[in-house]
Image (spheres, rainbow, N blue to C red):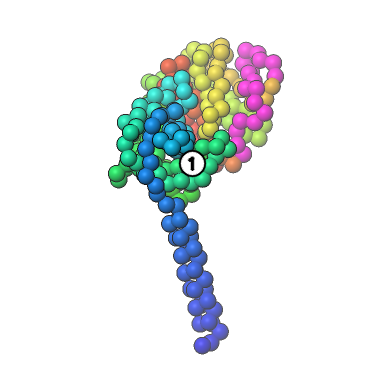
Amino acid sequence: MDKKHALLLAFLITTLIAGNYFFFVEAGVSRESVEITRVLDGDTVELDDGRKVRLANINTPEKGLAYSELARNYLEEFVGKNLEMENLGGDKYGRTLGRLYFDDKYINLEIVRQGFAHTYLVFEDEEREFARAEEYAHDRELGIWESPEYADCISATINKYDEYVVVYDSCDLDLKEWTIKDESTKTYRIDEDAGSELTIYSGEGEDSTNVRYWGKKKIWNDDKDRIFIRDSSGLLVFYDSYS
């Protein structure tokens, strides 16, 4: 065998081994039968063995916020039923990170598709299907994606390096009690209207009419993040993302 063919054969063998390696890593995530006994919130449940499971790839509105009951009520439908779970390890709060299934339904994905949650920290091999599910809900304004008729009045720009966001209001709306949220759970509530332009810095400072301070050292990620602006009733007035 000449050198050229030997190198080609070695490359093919290496590729095959690598492919099998990744296949077996994925296949190593086994499923187990579980039963939900209690729904803690829209993305966290408790099992009959006491484990608390945080659903992977999704983020639902915090308890008490608009639309927070959508995913919670959906999960209540599965209490006492036999489900399957893929255990993906633990999180910093001691919960199990998991994928839940009922029959042929992937519950995590369905929650996004119905507009009960947006995607969050999605596993790389699931990014495409979760992006499609979110796009489906967003395009139809389902659940958390529901927008009012005056949504076009609001725009915003983020300076992720200097840590501030500027909100522009072209319709002289009253922004009091509106909220601004990043991709995670960091939320700022506007306590008083500021007119046509409002700048909100992430850190500490003294508020003025058109300048406010979030009170957090860092809000906006340097690599990728999203912004959700909602009115006082929880309707989505502005949404954008960067990466």
Q: Which residue, as the protein is rendered here, is positioned at the far right?
A: 205
**Along the line of sight, the residue nearer the viewer: 223 or 84:** 84
Image quarter hosting the C terminus: top right
Classed neighbour count for the residue bearing mark 1: other residues with Cα under 10 Å, few (<14), some (14–19), many (≥20): many
Q: Which residue, as the protein is rendered here, is positioned at the far left?
A: 103
Q: Residue at x 49, y 73 (%)?
A: 13
Q: Is residue 109 in sight in this rendering?
A: no
Say what amino acid the circle numbered 1 marks.
Leu
Residue 150 position by quadrant: top left
Q: Residue at x 55, y 16 (%)?
A: 190
Image coords of residue 55 (percent x, y): 45, 38
Label 1 belongs to which residue? 97
Q: Residue at x 50, y 18 (%)?
A: 178
Q: Which residues are magenta?
A: 205-222
Q: Is residue 142 above or below residue 103?
A: above
Q: Is residue 186 above or below residue 198?
A: below
